[in-house]
Amino acid sequence: MEEKNYLQDIHDIKNLMNRSSTFISLSGLAGVMAGIYALIGAYIANGILKHSRDSYVTLESNTFKMMVLTAVTVLVLSVATAFILTYFKAKKAEEKIWNSTAKRMVVNFLIPLVTGGIFAFLLLRNESYGLIAPITLIFYGLACVNASKYTLRDIRYLGITVVILGLITTEYSGYALEFWALGFGVCHIIYGSIMYFKYDRNN
Amino acid sequence: MKNIIQNINKAFDHRIRLGIMSVLMVNDSADFNTLKELLGVTDGNLASHTKALEAENYISIEKQFIGKKPNTSYIATKDGKKAFREHIEALEKLIQKS
């Protein structure tokens, strides 16, 4: 009787330590969806680029505007899907979605991400397009690594994978779109599925 | 065996006090509402247990205003962390023994 109580104590301690310091409601399915959006986006971008093979891509060109529109659509859809799926997962676990662990995770995710976003924007203004793909990959990866301290550990490995892909892309900038699709598309789908099978399905 | 039982700390021998310490071990600080939510207890219940832990000098209380709202947050003291670690070790040993 006594001993059972002590086991329960240890179990409670572990559970509370996890719940209070990490945001566990992150949905794996959201990662898979984000990956699918990114792949569709990359496919569309590939089509746009093929269409205007011989003309240079400049800030004012329609090609560039279409590419930005595609990228923004992918981003908005991914964030919206992640929010909705995470909201339902948190609700099911009777946890508030906007608790202090969620805040900490989001803030730590945004610091590298916004830095990278501004950096990419400045590069665009200075017309160095070649580094946009690796920069977005590397900073997104670092954002994941940074946020992973406050959420599921799998995000850390996703981040590291994406950073490595970003570094490789820097060397092979001719395949920027392919690497970009690999990083934002395939990696999200793989890690999202892993997280889904690991955490979501049993509950 | 006697030694182990000595290390089982009476102050932590309650689900809520154990919970408060668990949260404060892994977070720099936690405010009243966060603790309430995590532990699923009433205001009065939480207040009495935090008072008990404060009396033992295991946690310290920080009161401040966020805008116009008063905000109370709790921090585990050095003594509290040490005592809690010993308590967990004692628990683990007890489980291993049996």
Image: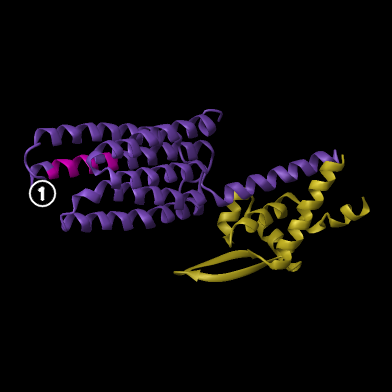
Check disc 1 and report its element: helix, strand or loop: loop
- Kindly indicate the quadrant of the structure image that contains residue B10: bottom right
Q: Amino acid at mark 1?
A: Thr
In front: B40, or A155?
A155
Taking depth in this image into account, of A119 and A86 the one nearest to the observer is: A119
Expressed as whole percent of the image width and height from the top left, the position of residue A159 reads 42, 45
Is residue B13 or residue A107 the one in the foreground? Answer: A107
**Residue A186 position in % (x across, y down):** 36, 33
Magenta residues, start to end: A64-77
Q: Is residue B25 left or right of residue A132?
A: right
Q: Is residue A25 left or right of residue A35?
A: right
Q: Is residue A75 magenta?
A: yes
Residue assigned mark 1: A58
Residue in the image at 81% along x and 57% along y: B9
Please say whether residue B45 is visible from this viewpoint: no
* Image quadrant containing the N terminus of chain A: top right
- Outermost front residue: A171
Whole-percent x, y for residue A166 in the image: 34, 46
B71 versus B45 height, above or below: below
Looking at the rendered structure, the number of numbered marks drawn on it comes to: 1
Q: Colour of chain A?
A: purple
**What is the letter of the yellow chain?**
B
Helix, strand or loop: magenta stretch: helix
Of the 4 image quadrants, the one containing the C terminus of chain A is: top right
Chain assignment, label 1: A
- Which residue: 19% across, 50% down? A129
Q: Position of residue B66 (x, y in %)?
A: 47, 68
Label 1 Cα neighbours within 10 Å, binned few <14 / some 14-19 / many ≥20: some
- Name the side, left or right, on which A183 lies relative to B28: left
Compared to residue A136, the image places residue B82 above or below, namely: below
Which residue is outermost to the right? B2
Q: Nearer the viewer, residue B53 or A31?
A: A31
